[in-house]
Amino acid sequence: MSSLTDAVRAGRTAEVVSLLDELTDAERRSLFPELKALRKELRTAPWDARSRRAYPALHAAGVACQTGAAAVAAWLAAPELRWSPASPGVLLHLLGDRDADWLADVTHRLAGRPPSADVPYELMAGLVRLAGCPVPTTDAYVTGWMRHIAQVWQVGGTLTDRLRRDPHLGELVAALFETDDVGGLLGRSAAEGPDSWIGALAQLTAEGALDRERTVDACVARLLRGGAASDQRVFLPLLGALSLTRDEEREHTTDWLALASDGGSVVASYAQSVLGKLALDGGLTARQLAEMSRGVLFRPERKLVRAQLILLGKALSGDAATAGELLPAVGQAFGHEDSEVQERAVKLVERHIGKTGSPEVRAELAELAAQLVPGLRVRVAATLGSAVADAGPAVYEELLPPVPEPSRLSPAPTSVFEVAEEVGALEASPADVAAYERTLDGLVRHAYRDRDGVARALRPVLARRWWSDARYDRARKDDFFGRTPLTLDLVLATVAGEVSTAVLHTLAVRGPRGSACVHGALLDPMAARLAEVAYRIRTDPLPCLLATPTWRTGLLDPAELVDRLAEFARLGARVPAADFAQALLRVGREDRGAAVAAAERASALGTPEGFWLAEWLTKDPVRPPAPRRTAGPRILVEFGESAEPGAAFPAGFRRLGAAITAPEGRWQCYHWDATVRHHWLAVLPENREAVAARILRDVSTAALDDTRGVTAALPSLAESGGPAGDATHLCVAYGLGARHPEDRLAAVDALLVLAARGQLDGARLGGDLAQLVRGGAVKPSRLAESVRTAASTGANATLWEILRHTLPVLLGDLATEETAAPARGLGELLAVAAECAERCGARGELPHLARTAGRRGSSRLVAQARRLRSALTEGVAA
């Protein structure tokens, strides 16, 4: 081993540099294999003080002992060498005698790497100076430059001063506008003044150090690109700091039109204000204003839409000749989801339609009026006359999604290599019940034929599991599997021979440790089945699993279960108790004809399991007893003991029949992983209420505690079997009031599936929502968004049936405390209810509505109450 390698291993960087300075290029190259071998050795060594000490010297030596530009750049940016690199000064010293073109090549290779490579800016900038090459304008170089120049406090002066002295200011600022995700860097310094990026760039532009036209164009172009909100929050204020003149604003008219239509909300508002001033000063033609309006009036932001209608009103009042161009643009607001926006547009048409006699304009408005809510449609008909004399509500047809068709599981993997692929894929989608069950069944089937072959096929897939590492002894692995909640890893470790038979026997005999939380009853059967499967793979392999579902919901076809029992009898295989118990809980009994036919075949098998299955299939399922509700803002459901499953079931399944009580106090457990909840529904696929009651607390946190992702199982809950009772409807109610839009959307999907299957109880759900809103668990504004989303699919009658049981409670509370401010969002909820009632033609009295509609003022709450009252009594909006 050379003295250079000894010095590198000892971490003596100064000595390494001194030795390298004395060597020729050929001598340096001859030493590189030793350095390469040392790097390989350090990769597998523990990350301790000795390794950290060697890395900087190795980083420097490897750069000096290679001659290829690509190889040197790769060495400089190698991930493990960057953990503890040589300083840029040392690296530049070692590279200083290289050819300028070679140095330029290395520079641009380093700068071309992604910013996440963390190549030091000081190194890249030093190489630029040595090579005398053009400055790179890549993302890595620009972001490195920005961090460096903002943080070099030793240089002194403000950020503006440091930028003013930079020789590459123009090129790098131009590249800054082209670099993604720089908003965070630009906004880190002070918001204003010479030490902020916005203040510095504006000041340098005013001084002429930066070309004004180029800077303005680049800033506008960056806003047109869109991108991260953090970028928009910086480039928009920068544009404001540049203080555009009226001529500059006029030059970018086309850009403002595009931003007003498609920009982010804040950017669109700015563009709208610029265009508004131009329009009122005569700098915008009527055609351009109409084009702008058609884009803005389609936006969902009510503030932007209202501002645009106000602008159109001013333009129409200022110049009557523009009516023929602008009124059709006003008509675009007829299709807005907010009825107040629609009414503002209708008022504009009523006020200004007399300024144009064009039959084409009237015909276009008449066509657009078909999008209005029925009451406003009648008003437009009266305004336009014969052109829409027949306008009126069409015959209503409720639109619900098709009832979900059950889909079958694909057959088990046919080869050991396919099993290995399925195991690897399962890591990416652990919540997929179908993939999990297919993989488990495939492991069992192939382990029955050739366990060693399965182990060999799985070896590359399991290499990343900690328990497959030979450095950990058997005792540690056994301790882990003996104490940890059971997962598929237990079966995989069993196949791979990484867990002892003694531990497997203990787990199979003792059963799962269980959990005292409300989820434990759903986890115990899964754990008991996995423990049994693992033990049988080791001692008495199973030809297949009995409980593998037929359908993706977890349901098992009774005829298929009989076939599997027959196969066990033919092979003389012992039936696994836990797997058979899970099969009984999954087998379909709601189709009585199929269940009775399968029962006859099961009896004919003449086995104990066949007789048990026959008895199970011929009796009606036992449903949970009558529920009890808890009081308070968090309403939960409790059930008494159930007769199913009974004492004949294995110990791991008996808690499914125990009473379900609501958790008390600050409740926590380790079952926070959302992927597990999807598997719980497959434990009892025809008894969703028992599952819903146990996940109700979890789902309630989406509304009360702003938890994300806990409603993802609601669509699957809606597709499950069994009655949809209190617990199921409360789950949906909490989901509709969830904080996060994706969680509310999952609840909307569940609501529509229940409605399509004829299992939604509108009165029950409406009453639940009223109590949750009254108690503060669900906010009316969030509920209004959910209901609006559901109604937009065409389910207006379904939603009205729910809301007509929700609103009387909320309006009644308002009527008894007239001085109290209404809950935020109640007006929005009334607006959605009014639209649903108008579209489905609902009629009748709604308790307490008249009193709310009779209140003074013109607030959204009062206006929408009047609109709903009018729709229910006369069919005409107020």
Image (cartoon, rainbow, N blue to C red):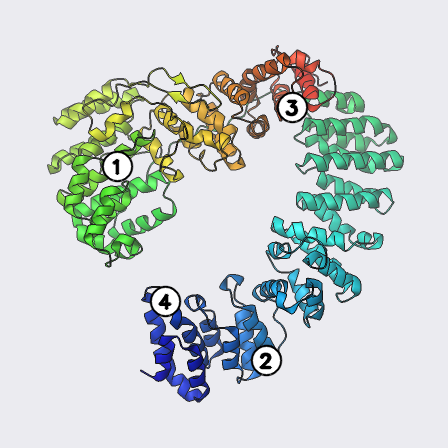
Quick one: quadrant of the N terminus?
Answer: bottom left
Mark 3 / mark 1, whichever is N-terminal: 1
Query: Which amino acid type is shown beneath numbered disc 2?
Result: Ala
Q: Measure the C-alpha gap from mark 4 to mark 2.
A: 36 Å
Q: Do residues under tags 3 and 1 come within 8 Å of each other at their CB atoms? A: no
Q: Which residue is mark 4?
A: 49
Mark 4 / mark 2, whichever is N-terminal: 4
Q: Measure the C-alpha gap from mark 4 to mark 3.
A: 65 Å
Q: Measure the C-alpha gap from mark 2 to mark 3.
A: 68 Å
Q: Position of residue 53 (x, y in %)?
A: 39, 71
Residue drawn at (32%, 48%) of the image: 422
Q: Which residue is mark 2?
A: 131
Q: Which residue is mark 3?
A: 827
Residue drawn at (62%, 65%) of the image: 153
Residue 391, visible in the rendered structure: no
Residue drawn at (56%, 68%) of the image: 121
Q: Position of residue 630 (x, y in %)?
A: 42, 19
- In depth, the one of 407 and 623 nearer the eye is 623
Residue 77, compared with residue 277, is above or below; it is: below
Q: Position of residue 111 (x, y in %)?
A: 55, 69
Q: Quadrant of residue 15?
A: bottom left
Mark 4 / mark 1, whichever is N-terminal: 4
Q: Do residues under tags 4 and 1 come within 8 Å of each other at their CB atoms? A: no
Residue 850, visible in the rendered structure: yes
- In depth, the one of 424 and 826 nearer the eye is 826
Mark 4 / mark 3, whichever is N-terminal: 4
